[in-house]
Amino acid sequence: MTKKITVNVNGTEHTAEVEPRLLLVHFIREVLNLTGTHIGCDTSSCGACTILLGDKSIKSCTVLAVQANGKSITTVEGLAPEGGPLDPIQEGFKENHGLHCGFCTPGMMLRSKELLANNPNPTEEEIRWGIAGNLCRCTGYNNIVKAIQWAGAKMRGEETPSTEPEFV
Ligand code: FES
Ligand code: FES
C-alpha cells in the first residue's frame, strides 16, 4: 500500500507515492536524493537528521514522510541559493571553524536557524541548551557556540565578533 504525498522541499514541490512506514529522513535522502541530511543513530538522539518542517526544527528520523504531506521542508541544500550568498548561519560556521568532519553540521545549522529565529541574541547557556539535542563528536562545541553567536550578530545587523577559533 502506498500514499501519495506532496511536499515543498527547499521551494520546490515534490509529489511521490510512498509507503506509510517510510521515515521522512529516508524520503529526503533516498527519494529526493538530498543527502546533506544525515543519519547518525537509530535512537533519535544524535540530531544529524535535523531539518526544518515549516519553521520548526525536527529530527526527520522521528517523523513519517506522510506526516509532511502538504508541508514545507528546508534541508541544508536549501540554506543558500546555488551560486548565491551563504546563509548567515553557514557563514558563521565557516568563519569560526564550527566543524571538523562536518557530519553533524547540516543538522546543527538547521537547529540553529530555529534557535536564532526564536531568540536572535541568545546567551552562551541558551545556545548550549538549544543545541543539546544535536551531538558533535569532533569540535568540543566551543566553535559551534561561537558560530551561532556570530550568525546572530550578523542577522541582527551588528558587527560580527572577531573570530578566534579554538582547536581541541
Ligand atoms: S539520525 Fe540520529 S536523531 Fe535522527
Ligand atoms: S564536526 Fe564531526 S561530528 Fe560535529
Image: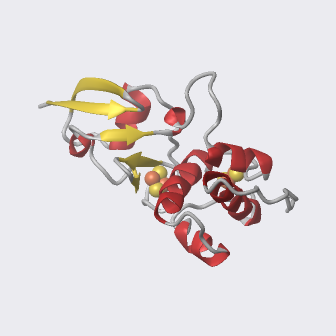
The mark total stands at 0
Q: In the current view of this chain or complex, which residue is farthest to the top?
A: 83
Quarter of the image where one finds residue 139: bottom right
Question: Which is more toward the observer, 112 or 27?
Answer: 112
Residue, x 45% and y 25% (percent of image)?
33
**Is residue 86 rendered to the left or right of residue 47?**
right
Q: Nearer the viewer, residue 77 or 18?
A: 77
**At which x and y percent is residue 126?**
58, 74
Q: Quadrant of the C terminus?
A: bottom right
Residue 166 x, y percent position in the rendering: 86, 62
Left or right, 50 with respect to 22, comes to right
The quarter of the picture where residue 143 lies is: bottom right
**Above or below: residue 114 compared with residue 86:** below
Does residue 15 appear left or right of residue 46 in this picture? left
Residue at the bottom extreme of this rendering: 125
Q: Nearer the viewer, residue 77 or 87?
A: 87
Corner quadrant of residue 122 = bottom right
Task: Please say if 150 is above or below 54.
Answer: below
Q: Is residue 162 left or right of residue 99?
A: right
Q: Where is residue 83 drawn, in percent x and y?
A: 63, 21
Identity of the residue drawn at 51% across and 65% down: 133
